[in-house]
Amino acid sequence: MATDITMYVLEGCPYCEAVTDRLDELDIEYDREEVPALHSGRNDVKRVSGQRAVPVLVDDDRGVTMPESENILEYVDRTLA
């Protein structure tokens, strides 16, 4: 099922897990895009956000692309909860 929210995450990343755990707690559907451990392999993240760090949330419905777990958590609680 396609959703309007995509999360770019790295397996084992505690910042990514904090965000996806919150989305799961709120029962918010999202597409999970696993990225490679090497920054040089994160071209998809670079393309959508302009940088290679994760997590990155993309909310197509609202036209929002956002890095940084603290900012994403605030956005989720304020806008999507």
Image: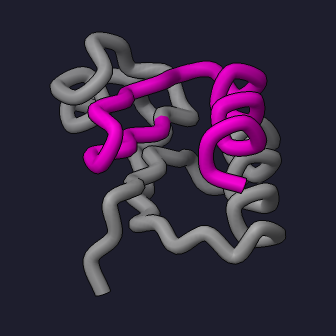
**How far across and down, in percent of the image, does residue 66 sit?**
47, 24
State how many labels appear. Answer: 0
Q: Most extreme residue toward the top, as rendered?
A: 50
- For the C terminus, the quadrant is bottom right
Residue 79 among those drawn in magenta: yes
**How far across and down, in percent of the image, does residue 34 sit?**
43, 56
Comparing 4 with 78, the one in front is 78
- In the rendered structure, which segment of residues is drawn in magenta? 57-81
Res 70 quadrant in image: top right
- Whether 63 is drawn above or below 11: the answer is above
Comparing 32 with 11, the one in front is 32
Residue 39 among those drawn in magenta: no
Left or right of 69, for residue 67: left
- Whether 20 is drawn above or below 27: the answer is above
- For the N terminus, the quadrant is bottom left
Res 6 quadrant in image: bottom left
**Residue lying at 53% horizontally and 47% vertically, measured from the top left:** 9
- Whether 26 is drawn above or below 22: the answer is below
**Residue lying at 40% horizontally and 55% vertically, measured from the top left:** 5
Res 2 quadrant in image: bottom left
